[in-house]
């Protein structure tokens, strides 16, 4: 008999996320981020996390605003057409958080190296930029096989925990992503623990018949949490797009106020009421 | 006879000039939050480059069909398509770039005379005056696209065109030489004032054509280093009536591209207007265009 991995969001975060962890978030920019997971991390007041995500925005800005972060590893952190990520920017400019300067390849290949259990992956790019000057852990080297090609060694990224939001999962931990997968499957396969937040619980049969099947396989999943609209205010294809109005109001609100209104002591239903209820949901549904 | 328009805005001029760089066999790389690039590619696709295909980093997809530019529903443009790349392979170094010619536009925070670019920070990296969002993949592949890289800068000023950039995150022609990664290097810089190219020998930035109504003095005053000048100074060909018509009415009727040019209150008003109009749409698939 297979074991169900269904948990509450509170239990999943308290069980699998520890202070000081290297935490990976799936999705990209305003797309398919487990912001419900972020809110729970803030509620539980986790500290000194290093956040790693391919392209970051809302999740990094909120976690930095919430005081949970000591280091960020991402190749881009911004709020798309809505501007810069304010709390992230302040924290970097005031020196209160560290940055590991990343590129698309340094993250993609870092995860790949972790998956292959090799210390690094080679890349032809980055050479000639200033990135090696601010990254002591990457190094230029000559092809050991003798072609004379100069390469950059990018170190593996071993995540402690990955937090991934998907439209569909079964309770045993198979997750299906309808749109782009980005780094999610590599994160799921390499992180020591993987938390999936999902819109809808389905049966394995449904996942087998969905394009892409189980991109996130149950073998590597630690917890499955059902959180409808759990990526809000970011998107979950093919169900809803990002909530532009909420993102605009986030950018205009002081973080302590925001936290009081939308995060602390709010369950999912109360949160959805607070962000505008049925009208907001109708706004974003595709 | 081609009819040139004499009634166009800065964003329209830039978009048209960017579209003209696209060739029919190109893979057009669309990044995050670059509606002007997207509009330019779509304009090219529905005018002179029907076989060019999109590669959306947002959807991790190759897409053939052209749809209207959208702010809220771009995932409907990018995800519902033939997907051939996934996961760790979604970064662009893994494109079969010996077989495909790619075109990608980068918008730098700072640029120097050799086309090196900075999207990381203003000031010292350890304690920056301004932390910019980051260079995404520019550091990885700007230097090995066989067809080179393409730059656009909607506000040409001495804050962006500087003698020495604070951080090199995109490689142009380092010290006037070709990058060792084998690409062709930056091909042009399109701004609100001028079309710039790079000198074949010295690899320094050079005036290509000056936009209608702009002067060489204005361009020099707005550039923090010396620009090379061609022997005969020519004018940029303005947008045609057709290009303007297709861009305004088919490709981007909501004017989303303008968000890359406007600032302050004006930008905020437009942003709100776009959001309001898109929220009113019942059908949230951006309109297919041909």
Image (cartoon, coloured by chain):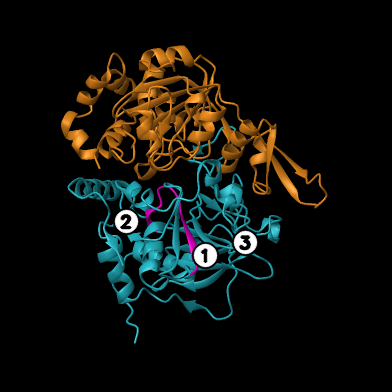
Left or right: B142, with A121 as reference point: left
Left or right: A67, with A158 as reference point: left
Task: Name which residue lies at 17% across and 48% down.
Answer: B282
Badge 3 crowding class, 10 Å Cα cut-off, few under 14, some 14 to 19, many 20 or more, is few
Whether labels 2 and 1 belong to a single chain: the reply is: yes
Query: Color used for chain A?
Result: orange
| The chain in cyan | B
In the image, the segment drawn in magenta is B25-36
Whether labels 2 and 3 belong to a single chain: the reply is: yes
Q: Are marks 2 and 3 in contact (CB under 8 Å)?
A: no
Q: CA distance from mark 2 to mark 1?
A: 34 Å
Badge 2 crowding class, 10 Å Cα cut-off, few under 14, some 14 to 19, many 20 or more, is many
Q: Earlier in the sequence, mark 2 or mark 1?
A: 2
Between marks 2 and 1 in the image, the one whose residue lies nearer the viewer? 2
Q: Earlier in the sequence, mark 2 or mark 3?
A: 2
Check disc 3 and report the residue beneath it.
Answer: B98
- Please report, as a chain letter, where disc 3 is located: B
Badge 1 crowding class, 10 Å Cα cut-off, few under 14, some 14 to 19, many 20 or more, is some
Relative image position of residue B37 (x, y in whole percent): 41, 58
Q: Is residue B116 above or below residue A107?
A: below
Relative image position of residue A236 (x, y in whole percent): 34, 37
Q: Is residue A32 above or below residue B266?
A: above
Query: Which element is circle 1 on?
Result: helix
The foreground one among A135 and B100 is B100
Left or right: B7, with B17 as reference point: left
Between marks 2 and 3 in the image, the one whose residue lies nearer the viewer? 3
Question: Tag on residue B69?
Answer: 2
Question: Tag on residue A52?
Answer: none
């Amino acid at each position: 008999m297979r074991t169900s991995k269904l948990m509450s969001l509170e239990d999943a975060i308290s069980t699998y996320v520890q202070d000081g962890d290297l935490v990976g978030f799936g999705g990209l920019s305003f797309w398919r981020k487990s912001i419900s997971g972020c809110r729970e991390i803030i509620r539980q007041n986790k500290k000194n996390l290093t956040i790693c995500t391919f392209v970051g925005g809302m999740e990094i800005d909120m976690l930095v605003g919430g005081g949970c972060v000591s280091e960020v590893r991402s190749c881009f952190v911004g709020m798309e057409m809505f501007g810069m990520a304010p709390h992230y920017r302040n924290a970097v400019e005031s020196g209160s958080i560290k940055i590991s300067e990343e590129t698309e390849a340094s993250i993609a290949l870092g995860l790949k190296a972790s998956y292959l259990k090799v210390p690094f992956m080679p890349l032809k790019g980055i050479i000639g930029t200033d990135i090696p000057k601010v990254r002591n852990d990457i190094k230029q080297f000559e092809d050991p096989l003798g072609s004379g090609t100069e390469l950059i060694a990018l170190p593996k990224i071993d995540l402690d925990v990955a937090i991934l939001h998907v439209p569909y999962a079964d309770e045993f931990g198979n997750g299906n992503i309808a749109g782009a997968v980005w780094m999610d499957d590599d994160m799921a396969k390499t992180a020591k623990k993987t938390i999936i937040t999902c819109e809808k619980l389905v049966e394995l049969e449904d996942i087998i018949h969905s394009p892409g099947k189980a991109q996130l396989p149950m073998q590597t999943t630690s917890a499955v949490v059902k959180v409808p609209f759990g990526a809000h205010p970011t998107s979950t294809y093919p169900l809803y797009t990002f909530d532009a109005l909420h993102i605009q109001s986030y950018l205009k609100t002081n973080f302590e106020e925001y936290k009081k209104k939308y995060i602390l002591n709010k369950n999912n239903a109360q949160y959805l009421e607070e962000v505008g209820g049925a009208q907001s949901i109708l706004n974003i549904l595709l | 006879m081609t009819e040139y328009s004499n009634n166009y805005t800065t964003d329209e001029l830039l978009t048209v000039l960017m579209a003209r760089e696209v060739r029919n066999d190109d893979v057009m790389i669309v990044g995050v939050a670059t509606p002007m690039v997207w509009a330019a590619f779509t304009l090219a696709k529905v005018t002179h480059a029907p076989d060019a295909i999109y590669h959306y980093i947002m959807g991790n997809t190759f897409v053939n069909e052209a749809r209207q530019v959208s702010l809220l529903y771009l995932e409907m443009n990018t995800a519902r398509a033939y997907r051939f790349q996934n996961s760790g392979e979604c970064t662009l170094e893994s494109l079969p770039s010996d077989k495909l010619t790619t075109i990608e536009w980068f918008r730098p925070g700072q640029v120097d005379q050799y086309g090196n670019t900075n999207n990381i920070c203003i000031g010292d990296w350890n304690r920056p005056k301004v932390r910019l969002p980051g260079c995404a993949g520019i550091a990885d592949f700007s230097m090995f696209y066989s067809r080179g890289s393409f730059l656009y800068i909607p506000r040409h000023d001495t804050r962006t065109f500087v003698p020495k950039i604070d951080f090199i995150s995109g490689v142009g022609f380092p010290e006037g030489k070709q990058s060792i990664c084998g690409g062709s290097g930056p091909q042009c810089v399109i701004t609100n004032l001028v079309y710039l190219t790079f000198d074949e020998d010295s690899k320094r930035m050079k005036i290509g054509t000056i936009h209608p109504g702009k002067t060489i003095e204005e361009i020099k005053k707005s550039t923090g280093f010396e620009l090379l000048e061609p022997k005969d100074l020519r004018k940029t060909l303005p947008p045609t009536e057709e290009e303007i018509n297709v861009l305004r009415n088919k490709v981007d009727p909501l004017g989303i591209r303008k968000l890359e040019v406007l600032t302050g209150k004006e930008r905020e008003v437009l942003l709100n207007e776009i959001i309001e109009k898109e929220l009113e749409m019942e059908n949230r698939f951006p309109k297919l265009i041909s």
